[in-house]
């Protein structure tokens, strides 16, 4: 587990909650799992809130349908939705208060120690303090510049990867949604896609019989066996040829 993973309480009798029983009755164990995965996502947010408009991203991450995620968030009064269409769990925030208060106390203690160190540093000769501050400012600017360069480079590489897939797939539909999905893929999945997409396009030479790119990505169709799909005219021609062969061999 990562050191910066955040904690939230999960009571052992949560399954007996009347609202969660209703979730399990209508959506099964999957609905119960979706609920707690949503709590994990909320705990990871700075303000413990998540936008309703991005529920499709959670559905992709959870490997389930957007309809089921929306149902769990909106239909059972398990979450609170504000005027900006963000949802949260007031109950989770309430249960987190003791932990958050301990964190605040620990942070205040650390700030006091830092203030003490800073006061001691100010007692040094003025030119030494100025040199140290100048060095800190310089290092901070260098780090900030490197972070910005890294983000720009990462964004360009991501766009370049997606453009390569978009051109190779040869069916232009829902580009923005496809790009949003592409950003969630792992490097291993992207490698598998590039190894497969050319063969899949060749197996469906007529784009109208080819799956929409968003459907293909969401369904992880690069893992499927590739078969040659014939259009209706080709199917009739193949059927006539097969009949003729059977008659000649009969």
Image (cartoon, rainbow, N blue to C red):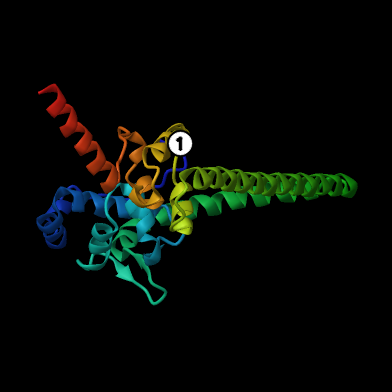
Closer to us: 163 or 119: 163
Residue 7 visible somewhere in the drawing: no
Image height of 188 relative to 143, above or below: above
The quarter of the picture where the C terminus appears is top left
In the rendered view, does 72 fall on the left or right side of 25? right
In the rendered view, does 185 fall on the left or right side of 40? right
Position in image of residue 35 (x %, y %): 25, 54
- Give the residue pinned by disc 1: 198
Image height of 163 relative to 22, above or below: above
The crowd level at tag 1 (other Cα within 10 Å; few <14, some 14-19, many 20+) is: some
Closer to us: 171 or 229: 229
Image height of 106 relative to 80, above or below: above
Q: Residue at x 55, y 50 (%)?
A: 109
Residue 60 visible somewhere in the drawing: yes
In the rendered view, does 160 fall on the left or right side of 200? right
Position in image of residue 54 (x %, y %): 40, 61
Callout 1 secondary element: helix
Position in image of residue 188 (x %, y %): 45, 33
The quarter of the picture where the N terminus appears is top left
Position in image of residue 223 (x %, y %): 33, 34
Question: Residue extending furthest bottom?
Answer: 83
Numbered disc total: 1
Q: Residue at x 44, y 53 (%)?
A: 178
Image height of 243 relative to 118, above or below: above
Closer to us: 134 or 61: 61
């Amino acid at each position: 587990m990562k050191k910066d993973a955040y904690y939230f309480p999960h009571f052992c009798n949560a399954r007996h909650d009347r609202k969660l029983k209703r979730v399990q009755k209508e959506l099964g164990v999957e609905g119960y799992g979706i609920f707690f995965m949503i709590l994990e996502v909320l705990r990871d947010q700075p303000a413990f809130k998540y936008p309703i408009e991005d529920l499709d991203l959670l559905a992709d991450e959870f490997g389930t349908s957007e309809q089921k995620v929306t149902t769990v968030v909106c239909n059972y009064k398990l979450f609170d939705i504000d005027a900006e269409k963000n949802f949260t769990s007031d109950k989770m925030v309430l249960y987190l208060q003791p932990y958050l208060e301990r964190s605040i106390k620990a942070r205040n203690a650390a700030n006091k120690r830092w203030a003490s160190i800073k006061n001691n540093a100010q007692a040094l000769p003025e030119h030494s303090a100025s040199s140290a501050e100048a060095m800190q400012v310089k290092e901070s600017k260098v780090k900030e510049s490197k972070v910005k360069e890294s983000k720009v480079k990462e964004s360009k590489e991501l766009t370049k990867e997606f453009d390569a897939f978009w051109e190779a797939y040869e069916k232009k539909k829902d580009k923005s949604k496809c790009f949003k999905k592409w950003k969630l893929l792992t490097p291993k999945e992207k490698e598998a896609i590039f190894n497969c997409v050319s063969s899949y396009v060749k197996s469906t030479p007529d784009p109208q019989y080819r799956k929409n790119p968003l459907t293909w990505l969401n369904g992880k169709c690069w893992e499927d066996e590739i078969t040659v799909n014939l259009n209706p005219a080709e199917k009739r021609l193949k059927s006539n040829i097969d009949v003729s062969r059977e008659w000649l061999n009969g």
